Amino acid sequence: MYRLAFAVLGWVALVAVPAAAEPLTCSCAYKGDGKLGPLTIDFDESARSVRITTQDGRVYRYQDGVTGRIAPSSGGDEIGPVEQFVKLTPGRVEVGFRWLDDGSTGHIAYFDPGSFKNPKTPCVWRSLWAFATG
């Protein structure tokens, strides 16, 4: 009798625990300055993090609230440590960074998270990188 009760209790506990969301990966066209695309985007909504891999292998990482480099210094990231952000809004994920010295925005890019869930929706990464570098 107790075994059956524990088995049922274990099953209920297993079903009641929500599964952790897996990061989603998508190939995205690139709209912005330079020729970085196509890009591979890894998006983890629960961790509020985005990892971008360019066609030439450079990797940029954004995680909400993290202060640090968006790319390894050997990867051409000469901007140094910055405050990263990942904002989730309806139909749009915005990523970017702020300069630590004055809090001004250094970069903003965005994409539609729905394109990761629906293969018929093209994924486009729109970058305002020229704003940060020009």
Image (cartoon, helix red, strand yellow):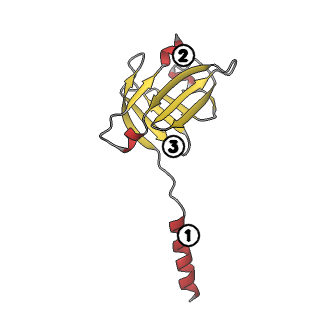
Give the Cα separation between the discs numbered 3 and 2.
Answer: 25 Å
The disc labelled 2 sits on which kind of residue?
A: Ala
Position of residue 19 measured from the top left corner of the image (x, y, whole percent):
50, 57
Classify residue 3 by image quadrant: bottom right
Q: In this view, does 62 lie above or below 16?
A: above
Q: Which residue is drawn at 52% across and 19% down?
A: 76
Extreme-top residue of the structure: 134
Quarter-of-image position of residue 84: top right
**Sooner in the amino-acid sequence: mark 1 or mark 3:** 1
Where is the N terminus found, in terms of image quarters?
A: bottom right
Q: Which residue is drawn at 48% across and 38% down?
A: 90
Residue beneath disc 1: 13
Q: Residue furthest front?
A: 90
| Residue under pointer 3 | 45
Give the percent coordinates (x, y) of residue 109. Answer: 48, 26
The residue type indicated by label 1 comes to Ala
Question: Residue 4 location in percent, x, y?
Answer: 53, 84
Residue at screen point 54% across, 38% down? 49
Farthest residue, direction left:
120
Asked which secondary structure carries label 1, the reply is helix
Q: Which amino acid does label 3 sit on?
A: Glu
Disc 3 to disc 2: CB gap under 8 Å: no
State if disc 3 and disc 1 touch (CB < 8 Å). Answer: no
Q: Residue furthest right?
A: 101
Q: Residue 132 carries which label?
A: 2
